[in-house]
Image: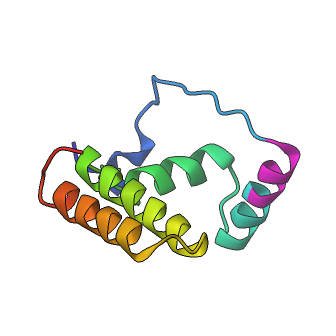
Amino acid sequence: MAWNPQNNNKNKANRITIRLSNDEFQTLSAKLDLSGYRKVSAFVRDYLITCEPKVKQVVRMDVIEVQRELMNLASMINAAKSRDELMDQVKKVSSVSLGGAR
């Protein structure tokens, strides 16, 4: 159901409870004053109904595995590992990035 400002005067039948720290409540109060709202419920309702939520980012497991192997490579470089060891790790990163087994 899309938000319609003409429906704003209808009786509100549902309720939510939000717990805030003192700092969060002070921030909310400041935003309430700045926006000209007199009631917290009206401010929060309008904000929640009209804002676009953040979209959850999903990171695939293969991307995490590539990241892990790249971090291992960086650690090996910092530890001044031999060229052969580094090349083996580069091959491993390449294999993992192409969907190969460890």
Residue that appears at 48% across and 54% down: 46
5 or 81: nearer the eye?
Answer: 81
Where in the figure is residue 58, as x and y percent of width and height? 30, 49
In percent of width and height, residue 95 lies at 17, 58
* Above or below: residue 54 compared with residue 8: below
Answer yes or no: is residue 40 visible: yes
Q: Is residue 11 left or right of residue 33?
A: left
Q: Is 23 included in the stretch rendered in magenta?
A: yes
Which image quarter holds the N terminus?
top left
Which range of residues does the magenta coloring cover?
Answer: 21-27
Residue 100 falls within the magenta-colored stretch:
no
Lateral position of residue 6 relative to residue 2, left or right: right
The overriding secondary structure of the stretch rendered in magenta is helix
Given residues 56 and 38, the one toward you in this image is 56
Specify the quadrant that holds the C terminus: top left
Q: Residue 101 location in percent, x, y? A: 17, 44
Residue furthest out toward the right:
22
At horizontal 23% and vertical 65% (from top left) the residue drawn is 91
In this picture, residue 48 sits left or right of residue 99? right
